[in-house]
Image: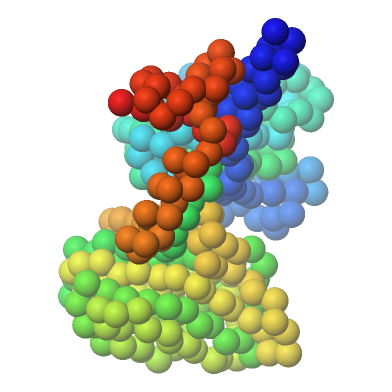
């Protein structure tokens, strides 16, 4: 009996481990203590109360009001997928104890949560289900009189292993100009001005397309969006895309300390897929794009222009041959099976069984 009991415990331990073998994947992060300025959305009357210091993003409110009257984005350009479960982790403190309301999503379609903070810098976790694709984290604290300091915001999800290939797909509606639809990738570290870089990637589209552009941009430029003078944008040559995976590349000296890559395909009405992105500085082999091969389904750093294309991770399971399938089934048939009491059962047993530490149903 002791042996059976011991084996039963081991079987359940193996089963539990198999079912909970999940990896935490980071979808978004911003460390405000390493930023130099606030460049997200806030109402004009709130912006003067926001500052970025070595401690993080500080918001000073001197008059009590309705929470929504003192609000600002603590994070933006989130790579969220509607209906998917996430965890938001925020590290913050206040000049006194208080409460902050968080709205995660898009305008009119948000996940809501309150956190009660103290005067000590602490990490708070907020589990939520995305109610919209993409979006932002809206911080509301009008009822709190004092200063809140947000050091960092991180968003993660859990996923198991996947046998196959993953890549990012943008779906465009088509437009008149190449800049009408853009895919953004925010670089973890800005490019070095005058240094030479090579950007390579695999790409395919739902139709042959001749105008895929890469326009690196410096989002911190004082001349931001002055398109005519190219004061913050570097316009690189167009590339052709086909319906099959092909590798394309650009080599360029950075004219500014670009911190965002803009891939423009405004006239395309359909899908365009990116995979195996590699950005290297001349003389180095370090890839400056995180998760460029999409080994996980993280969308960290990815977004699109306002009213632009939608985007998501596509998963393609690994193909298997008939011989491999037969061999796999034969191998499983040879492995011993046990019921949930830890007793070995034969091939004719019907119901839930444990084989190689995994639970399966026999009919």
Residue 209 placed where, x, y %? Answer: 24, 82
One can see residue 150 in this view: yes
Q: Nearer the viewer, residue 227 or 119?
A: 119
Q: Quadrant of residue 117?
A: top right
Using residue 191 as the reference point, say whether residue 240 is left or right of it: left
How many marks do you count on the picture?
A: 0
Using residue 213 as the reference point, say whether residue 38 is left or right of it: right
Q: Residue at x 58, y 46 (%)?
A: 25
Residue 33 placed where, x, y %? Answer: 75, 48
Q: Residue at x 31, y 88 (%)?
A: 240
Q: Quadrant of residue 242?
A: bottom left
Residue 99 placed where, x, y %? Answer: 62, 18
One can see residue 177 in this view: no
- Seen in the picture, residue 266 relative to 169 is either above or below; the reply is below
Q: Nearer the viewer, residue 229 or 98?
A: 98
Quarter of the image that includes the C terminus: top left
């Amino acid at each position: 009996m002791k042996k059976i009991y011991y084996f039963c415990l081991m079987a359940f331990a193996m089963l539990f481990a198999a079912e909970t073998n999940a990896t935490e994947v980071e979808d978004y992060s911003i460390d405000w203590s390493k930023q130099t300025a606030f460049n997200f959305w806030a109402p004009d009357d709130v912006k003067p109360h926001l500052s970025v210091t070595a401690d993080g993003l500080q918001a000073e409110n001197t008059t009590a009001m309705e929470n929504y009257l003192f609000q600002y984005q603590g994070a933006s350009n989130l790579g969220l997928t509607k209906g998917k479960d996430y965890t938001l982790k925020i590290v913050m403190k206040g000049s006194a104890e208080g409460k902050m309301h968080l709205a995660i999503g898009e305008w009119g379609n948000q996940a809501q949560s309150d956190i009660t903070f103290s005067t000590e810098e602490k990490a708070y976790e907020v589990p939520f289900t995305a109610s919209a694709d993409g979006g932002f984290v809206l911080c509301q604290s009008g009822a709190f009189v004092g200063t809140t300091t947000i050091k960092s915001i991180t968003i993660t999800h859990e996923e198991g292993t996947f046998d196959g290939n993953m890549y990012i797909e943008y779906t465009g509606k088509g437009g008149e100009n190449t800049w009408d639809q853009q895919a953004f990738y925010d670089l973890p570290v800005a490019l070095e001005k005058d240094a030479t870089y090579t950007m390579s990637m695999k790409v395919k589209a739902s139709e042959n397309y001749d105008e895929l552009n890469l326009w690196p941009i410096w989002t911190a430029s004082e001349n931001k969006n002055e398109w005519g003078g190219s004061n913050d944008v570097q316009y690189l040559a167009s590339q052709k895309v086909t319906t099959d995976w092909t590798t394309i590349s650009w080599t360029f000296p950075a004219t500014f300390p670009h911190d965002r890559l803009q891939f423009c395909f405004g006239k395309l009405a359909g899908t365009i897929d990116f995979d195996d992105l590699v950005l290297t500085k001349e003389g180095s082999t370090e890839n400056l794009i995180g998760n460029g091969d999409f080994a996980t389904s993280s969308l960290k750093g990815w977004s699109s222009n306002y009213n632009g294309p939608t985007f998501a991770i596509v998963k393609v399971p690994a193909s298997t041959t008939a011989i491999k399938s037969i061999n796999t089934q034969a191998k499983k048939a040879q492995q011993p099976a046990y019921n949930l009491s830890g007793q070995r059962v034969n091939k004719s047993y019907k119901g839930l069984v444990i084989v190689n530490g995994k639970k399966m149903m026999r009919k």
